[in-house]
Amino acid sequence: MKPAVWAAVCGAVRDELDVRLILDYLLRCRQQGTIQGIVFSTWQGELEKEPGIERLLETNDVIIVKTRSIDQAVGNLQANVVNYWRQALQLQRALEVIPADAIVLKTRTDRAMPPTRRLIEMLADEDPLPLVSNVKKQENLNGFPEVFEHQVAAFRPRTNRVFQFTDFAFMGYSRDLRKMLHFNQSGFLFSRFLNANMLFFIVTFVQDYPIIKDYERRIKYEALIPELDRYTSAGGIKFPEFLERFYAVYLGILTTHFRIGTISPKSLGQVGMPIAFSDFFHGTHAHHLGHSRLGTLINSSEVLKDFVEQPIESVDTTTQAVLRRMHGADASTFERASSHEVADLKAFTEDKNFSKESWLLDGRAIPAHQASVYSTSMAYKFPGISEEEQAELWSICSDVSSTDKVLLEFWLAHGILPADTPAYLSSGAKDGMALSILVMMRLLRKNYLDENDVEETLRVNNTQAKLGRQHRGGNIQMTCYVLNRVLYLQEIGETIPEELDLQVAYYLRRYMSGAKSDEVQTALYRHPEQLPQLFDELIAHSIEINKPVVHRRVIELALELTGKRKYWDLLEPLFTADEKLVRGVYEYSVKHDLLIQE
């Protein structure tokens, strides 16, 4: 019993005529029993442009799937990735309402009639999409990993821009097409940007065939398209070993996993024999291989089948080597370039007969091992201390799991100057140590930080304070470094971001009522001259209600925001014996004019 066949029409409603033509054709196919169902998958708002089409779809019992546009969600990612995601998302939504065991003919709303007709014609075959396992046995390509269960029918793959098919329409079992849907960023996966036509097909094979990613990383195939056409048309048959192995893999994947359709059968003649490996880089064999500026087109499965099945003794030595790799493939066949192959690629870049253009993107070899010698010390050079102290501090840092407190204590004990302080405290600040962030903010406001430390300190300040606000945590040091960020932005004339405004409100409310918090926040933003009076009132009130902790914290806030010495005089006696580190940070800040403004 043959499986059901469903058509998934995906795309925007750009041209009413095109949309009506493809739907009319598929509805007639459904009426004749060639296909059993149709899904129209588009964006929300598209069918509203042509309401008559939507009514006709509903009348003719076509399933309509509308998906919210992804444009806002993806922001300004590379257009090629977004174009693929648009198409893939619409196909995914269509597959959700199609039987899981169906054959799915994926087509689109425009420019897809010729390949759609050819796919429909394929359905007349007894087995239009053979099992990959059967094809592997038939063609003696047993070493190739099976990614699809059945072949996928598609058109015009290229041999330079590998896996670039003409993707207006293709067809496969639902479970195989679902494997072609990927929503990762191809620029991260391949180290280069690939177009949407390629992304439907290439990502599916990368995990089982690592050599594919290596090809994309190493080869500037755009430069080789005209060069290999010239080279092979003139009789050139020598290729780098890596390319021979790669194309043995690529042509094997096309042979086993794809049924390459022919959009215009009348344009093809009889495949001439023998078929050389070099033929795949220029137009030949009665248009079964056709040169284009985007790479040589493979216009039929017939030319692949004849290439794989031909007697090995009938072809040149390079073609023999490629065929032997295909038929004798094992796990190593699909791996990345070896050091020997990388050296060979580099050597070929000097062969101007092969190519006059620069085509090797990455000539680095993967080393088998590294020398074990440790010749130059990685010890960090801390400024402002002697060689002996350097060695002592580095030894301590090497033996502890976290250096944050060690460095803070060392910095205090040795009275490191403000200009040298970032080297000791920046890592602790980046780890979220509140005291270190506070000192770094005080240094920032006094212009002791370089550009990188300024950026990192402000980033960490916001990140840690935001987490504290969201999780209802935080302490007085966090509050003070949040307020320092406000003071810094005011000093450089920048507006207060919404998130920082929320942080200020949250942290002030930890130490005073909502009404007083609002007063202090307003004064901070608009009337800083009012802050001393407000804090004096808050300090007096804290004494009146006998809240020593609040009393202490309000004094710390007053000192941070006003820089008045009178608040330091109030605060200094309040430090306890257990607060040696906190006291030291404040005393250091006062001594080096980081805190007292008058």
Image (cartoon, rainbow, N blue to C red):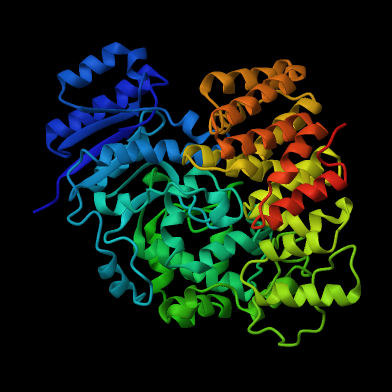
Image point (48%, 65%), residue name: 250
Q: Is residue 77 left or right of residue 121?
A: right
Quadrant of the drawing holding the C terminus: top right
In this orientation, which residue lies closer to the viewer: 352 or 13? 13
Location of residue 314 in the rendering, given as x and y in whole percent from the top left corner: 48, 79
Quarter of the image for residue 230 reads bottom right
In this orientation, which residue lies closer to the viewer: 474 or 312? 474
Q: Is residue 62 left or right of residue 51?
A: left
Q: Residue furthest left?
A: 1
The answer, for residue 327, to whether it is visible in the render is yes
In this orientation, which residue lies closer to the viewer: 338 or 279? 338
Image point (25%, 37%), residue name: 7
Quarter of the image for residue 464 reads top right
Asked if 531 appears above or below 267 in the picture, the reply is: above
Quadrant of the drawing holding the N terminus: bottom left
Asked if 348 appears above or below 25 in the picture, the reply is: below
Asked if 597 appears above or below 229 in the picture, the reply is: above
Asked if 591 appears above or below 228 in the picture, the reply is: above
Image point (47%, 52%), residue name: 157
Location of residue 80 in the rendering, given as x and y in whole percent from the top left corner: 54, 40
In this orientation, which residue lies closer to the viewer: 5 or 306? 5
Image point (44%, 75%), residue name: 326
Q: Residue furthest bottom?
A: 372
Location of residue 290 in the rendering, given as x and y in whole percent from the top left corner: 52, 51
Q: Is residue 281 left or right of residue 302?
A: right
